[in-house]
Image (tube, rainbow, N blue to C red):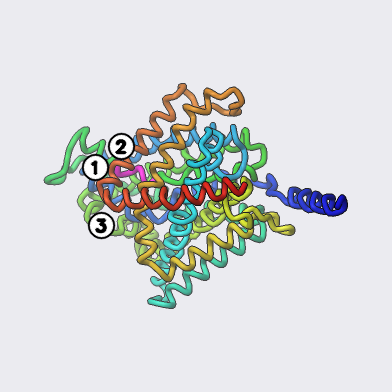
Amino acid sequence: MGKEVNKSTDIVVEEEKIALKRKLGVGTVISLGVGTTIGSGIFSSLSQVAGAAGSSLILVLSFLIGGIIQIPANFCYAELASAYPEDGGQYVYFREAGSRPLAFLCGWISFWATDPPSISIMALAIANYLGFFVPLHGISLKIISVLMVLIFMWIHIRSVEGGGKFQNFITILKILPFILIIGIGLFNLDNNLLLSSHPVAGKATGIMALIAGISSTTWSFDGMAAPAYMSGEIKNPSKNMPRGLIWTAIIVLSLYVGLTFVSSGMLSINELIKSSAPIALLASKIPLIGNFAGTFVAITAVIVIIGSLSSCIMFQPRLEYAMAKDKLFFKSFAKVHKKYETPYVSIMVQCFYAIILIFATDISNLLGYFTLVSLLRNFLTFGTIFILRKKKEYNPSYKAPFGYLMPIVAMFMTGTLIYSTFLWAPVAGLIAAATAIITGLPAYYFWNKKA
């Protein structure tokens, strides 16, 4: 009997030895944040924001002020990540704030309704842009999408260091085309267009147009907190996480404002509003690039979305890994590969689920209604700071400045998204929220009782 107990203890000790290690530096924190944020959305959001702003001047101000207002969210995540330097992101913050059910629901929704669908959507987007060079339709399009998922699944299972290096490389590569457009564009601006005001009939003007424009930019800045999911694998997280998250915000803001400024000096506001591909239209006006603008934009899009796909496959599975470690999810998700030292089961299952969604686009569209639930989760995440700061054991190495102003601003900005999303699909959003609770709470009580 004694021998059996010792053997069991040895197994437990052996499992504890195989854990995720701190192998990533501040560069990967930045590349994860920038790589996740700057995705396919920038290729269409410019025209959407222009439509809301109604003038070139307000378009630039919308991205500038919208980006500045989003920075408080990164300050909040920097504080939370420095207080709890472990994998899991939002799940960990809810758990430490004293709400295990809410923490569980956070991961439950992420796994079933938001994270794998984002992988499938990006993989399909890459295949669609590749179709510019080689005709891809039907099953061939889906096969290429599946290959994209499998390639990056393999990269991020094989090595977190290798995955980090690739993420650093692809993020640098994805911002170079934008730097090129901004750099050349700055020397070819039309003074008659630059920051001019061209009100569009029927559009709001003045402060109301600015508010509408700022609100339209909020989605463009979503994703900057991605590195928080991997705090447990960042070297010296108390310094590197806050530093990386703040630099992420600065880089994204600089690129967006620079791109918008050049656009406002080379295209009229009416051209920006009417264009379904504003970046392609801008590229066509840039010297040296204009003659092959279509090819340039297609290549840029493929690189940009590959960076986002790689980033999501890298950081998203860490949430389920953290839940499984707490025995609040399938225990296999907590497995770490003996050789590669990565949460291989969590990565594989999430990617295989994404592959299923690639062949079931209607389901992917349906899961999009969970956006409202996801935004509510973000809203409550910032609210955890109000609870955690009152706890004696809460000791972050970095604290968001100006007291509670940063979480208040972050909650306000997320609240505007919640409001606009609710207006878009109120009934579907409420059904999605009810579904998350009805399916998630019984699952939580099952695993909690088992644990």
The spot of residue 238 in percent (x, y) is 62, 33
Q: Label 1 sits on what residue type? A: Ala
Q: Give the CA separation, mark 3 to mark 1.
A: 15 Å
The spot of residue 70 in percent (x, y) is 40, 37
The spot of residue 219 in percent (x, y) is 36, 46
| Left or right of 77 on screen, residue 423 | left
Q: Label 2 sits on what residue type? A: Leu
User: Which residue appears at 61% of the width and 61% of the height?
Assistant: 155
Q: Label 3 sits on what residue type? A: Ser
**Observer-nearest residue: 178 or 403?**
403
The spot of residue 316 in percent (x, y) is 53, 52
Q: Give the CA separation, mark 1 to mark 2.
A: 9 Å
- Residue 219 among magenta residues: yes
**Observer-nearest residue: 105 or 78?**
105
* Callouts 1 and 2 close, C-beta under 8 Å: yes
User: Which residue appears at 35% of the width and 61% of the height?
Assistant: 365
Q: Residues within 10 Å of mark 1 (few under 14, many from 20)?
A: many
Residue position marked by numbered label 2 in the rendering? 61
**Observer-nearest residue: 411 or 174?**
411
Range covered by the magenta-colored residues: 215-220
- Give the structural element (helix, strand or loop) at label 1: helix
Residue position marked by numbered label 3 in the rendering? 275
- Give the structural element (helix, strand or loop) at label 2: helix
Of callouts 1 and 2, which one flags the residue occurring earlier in the amino acid sequence? 1
Viewer can see residue 254 = no
Q: Quadrant of residue 293?
A: bottom left
